[in-house]
Image (tube, rainbow, N blue to C red):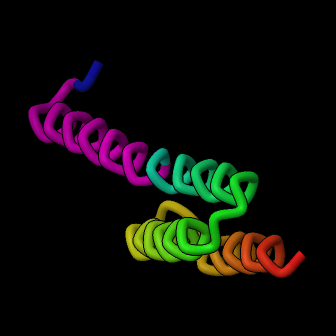
Amino acid sequence: MPQHKSAEKRAKQNLRKKNANLMVFNQFRSSIKNFEASLKEKDKEKIKLCLQKVNSLAFRAVKKGIIKKKGASRTISKLSRLIKS
């Protein structure tokens, strides 16, 4: 338990930030799953839209410091290679 008032405030702030970061990360992961589902359907328009969504959410997570830039780029690259095959 926090002993000081500032430590209590910091604990609350950390919890709020953790929840916000989890929400962004979960949106990113679910967008990847939606992309993979659209690949199975073979709908080219939906695939393109889903890849744009994944790209947007990946770099939003990078901007917030949730994932690293190279990791996001690697994920986008892997998914775009799946389109070509």
Task: In this rendered view, identify the residue nearer to me: 69 or 4.
Answer: 69
Q: Residue at x 37, y 45 (%)?
A: 23
52 vs 19, left or right, is right
Q: Is residue 82 left or right of residue 32?
A: right
Q: Nearer the viewer, residue 46 or 68?
A: 46
Q: Does 52 sit above or below residue 21?
A: below
Q: In the orientation shown, which residue stands out farthest toward the top?
A: 1
- Taking the magenta stretch, the answer to whether it contains residue 24 is yes
Quadrant for the C terminus in the image: bottom right
Comparing 75 with 48, the one in front is 48
* Residue 20 picture location, percent across and down: 31, 47
Describe residue 71's horizontal placement relative to residue 66 as left or right.
right
What is the x, y in percent for residue 84?
83, 81
Quadrant in the picture for the N terminus: top left
User: Which residue of the protein is positioned furthest toward the left in this rendering?
Assistant: 5
Q: Nearer the viewer, residue 24 or 48?
A: 48
Dominant secondary structure (helix, strand or loop) of the stretch shown in magenta: helix
Give the image location of residue 6, x and y in percent: 13, 41
Residue 43: percent from the left, percent from the top? Answer: 63, 64
Residue name at image x 69 percent, y 53 percent: 41
Q: Residue at x 40, y 53 (%)?
A: 24
In the image, the segment drawn in magenta is 3-25
Relative to 50, 32 lies left or right: right
